[in-house]
Structures are given as structure tokens and as C-alpha cells.
Amino acid sequence: MAHGILIESLIEAENVDKLQRSFVATADIDGGGVVSLTAPTQQGDNVWTATKGLVEGKTIAIAYNPQAHYTDVNGKRYAGLSNDDRDYTNLAGEIGGAFIPRKDDEIVITVEDIVTDTLALAVAGNYLVPTASDFRWTATAEAPQSGVALQIENVENLQFPPVKGSIGFTVQNAVKAVVIAE
């Protein structure tokens, strides 16, 4: 199964440490997934707790692709079975990374990061908003009134893996979006 991935296009967090967060979650989170973060309670701990989607009063962040490429197979953990980011996710119980989105940040996410029932609405001019019960985004035609929101610039086909040449490429549907509300 291919996992959703994030392609950092232009995000402020790349150059601002205070917008970066380390997290641990109780469920797997794909790169590009949206999380609500709860601050650590122990002094000196900088690992936040990630929960699904939109939780009022919590910090909203977007998960990076996992830095460590682990895969669990039949209860055993293996490292680096593939060079394709779509084969990996931020595993539950492991430390992952996320960033706090800022207005005008541009990101590209694959369609696996969007709730399947709303994919038909993932078109240019529409919006992506956090889903209350999921790590994925919800596509909507209605402009959000509050909270974190992204406006879809375009839907594109990306070649994977991203290397020179064309032999062995697969096409991946992706959505390029801009943060319009924090």
C-alpha cells in the first residue's frame, strides 16, 4: 500500500526552528498528514503527543515524511527495504517530525493524504481542512470560516521515484496547495 507523502515546496518552517515539532502518536501517520499536538508536560521533554486531525485548542501541524525508513512485517521491523518514500509512514510509538503551517506556505501532498470520500472535491480553487477523526485532510468546496485551511492551486501527476530517466517510473496523483489560514 502506498502511503501519503509530503513534498515541501515553500514552507517557512524549513528556516524557522520554533515551527518544528517532534511527536509520538498512537497510530501511524503518513507524511503530509494533519495532526493536533499536545505539548509535553515534563520539563526538558521536547516530544509532543500527536492526535488525529482537528482538536480544539491544540496546535495544528503537518507531518513530515519519516526520516527513518522502517517497515513492520509480521511483527518484525525492517529498515530500508525500499528507496521510495511512498513505502513508509511515521510508525506509531516512534518519534516523527512535523511543522506548524504558516500563511502562504506551499506544500504538495499525494492523494493518499486526503479523505477518499472527498477526493472528487480536490480540484483547483477548492480547500483542504483538517478532519476531526483522521490524520488525512478533507477536501471541500466551501471556504472555511476558521482554523487551518489550504487552498488547492492545482492537481498534478508526479513521477516516482524522482530520479533521472523514465524506466520504472510510476505516476502519482498529487495536490499542490497554499496555506490560507493558520
Image: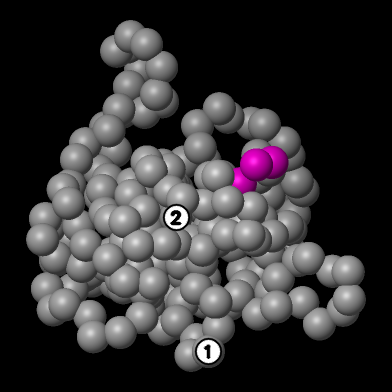
Give the SS element for disc 1. loop
Find residue 57 and name its label. Answer: 1
Which percent across, then down, holds residue 56?
A: 48, 90
Which percent across, then down, holds residue 123?
A: 12, 57
Q: Is residue 115 visible?
A: no
Left or right: residue 62 compared with residue 28: left
Q: Which residues are magenta?
A: 64-68
Distance of label 1 from label 2 (alpha carbons): 21 Å
The front one of 76 and 12 is: 12
The front one of 174 and 152 is: 152
At x 66%, y 69%, the residue is 25
Q: Is residue 21 above or below residue 60?
A: above
Which percent across, then down, holds residue 164?
A: 37, 11
Residue tagged by mark 2?
32
Q: Is residue 130 magenta?
A: no
Left or right: residue 136 compared with residue 23: left
Q: Residues within 10 Å of mark 1 (few under 14, many from 20)?
A: few
Left or right: residue 140 compared with residue 43: left
- Amino acid type, label 1: Gly
Q: Is residue 12 above or below residue 46?
A: above
When asked about the image quadrant of residue 22, the answer is: bottom right
Residue sticking out furthest to the bottom: 56
Give the dominant element type of the magenta stretch: helix, strand or loop: loop
Residue sticking out furthest to the right: 43
Give the SS element for disc 2. loop
The front one of 91 and 15 is: 15
Q: Is residue 148 above or below residue 97?
A: below
Indicate the colouring scheme.
one colour
- Foreground mark, 1 or 2, reads 1
Which percent across, then down, holds residue 69?
A: 65, 39
At x 58%, y 60%, the residue is 19
Q: Earlier in the sequence, mark 1 or mark 2?
A: 2
